[in-house]
Image: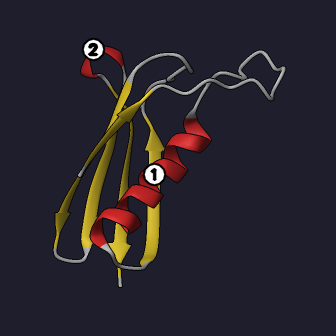
Amino acid sequence: LLASGVLNNTLLDETWKDILAGRLALMLLEMARAKSGKQVTGFTFQGRAPLFDLNPFRLIGRQNGNTVELEALGPHGKITMNASAQLA
C-alpha cells in the first residue's frame, strides 16, 4: 500500500493551521479501507513529528491478515505518524 502527495491548507487561519495531523490520520484510515477492500473495525494512531502542508509526504501500509500497519513519512523519510487498522 503506498500513496504520496502534497496538500495546501487555505481554510484555517491559526498559528498551527498547516499541521496535517488530523488529515493524515483520516488519509491513513481511508487508505487501509480502500486498498484492502474491507471495512475497518478499529483504528489507532499516534503522531510522531509535525508535518506541515506543502511538504512532500508518503503513506505506507503493510497488511498482515486483518491488521494493517500504517506510517506517514515526511520529508527525508522521517516518520510523522504511525497507525494500526483492524479489518473486518
* Amino acid type of the residue tagged 1 in the rendering: Phe
* Amino acid type of the residue tagged 2 in the rendering: His
- The crowd level at tag 2 (other Cα within 10 Å; few <14, some 14-19, many 20+) is few
Quadrant position of residue 33: bottom left
Give the numbered dot on residue 57. Answer: none
Q: Is residue 24 above or below residue 13?
A: below
Does label 1 or label 2 sit earlier along the sequence?
1
Question: Could you say where residue 74 lies in the image, as x and y percent from the top left?
Answer: 37, 23
Q: Residue furthest right?
A: 13
Query: Which mark's residue is nearer the viewer, 1 or 2?
Result: 2
Helix, strand or loop at disc 2?
helix
Q: Residue at x 56, y 21 (%)?
A: 53
For this rendering, which residue is in front, 56 or 19?
56
Q: Which residue is mark 1?
A: 45
How far apart are the alpha carbons under marks 1 and 2?
21 Å
Question: Could you say where residue 59 lies in the image, as x and y percent from the top left?
Answer: 33, 40
Left or right of 26, for residue 42: left
Q: Which residue is mark 2?
A: 76
Q: Residue at x 84, y 20 (%)?
A: 13
Q: Is residue 43 above or below residue 39?
A: above
Q: Residue furthest bottom?
A: 88
Question: Could you say where residue 36 lies in the image, as x and y percent from the top left?
Answer: 28, 70
For this rendering, which residue is in front, 56 or 80?
56
Question: Could you say where residue 27 lies in the image, as x and y percent from the top left?
Answer: 48, 49
Q: How is the image coloured?
A: secondary structure
Q: In which quadrant will I find the C terminus?
A: bottom left
Left or right of 67, for residue 4: right
Q: Is residue 44 above or below residue 5?
A: below
For this rendering, which residue is in front, 8 or 17?
8
Q: Residue at x 45, y 58 (%)?
A: 29
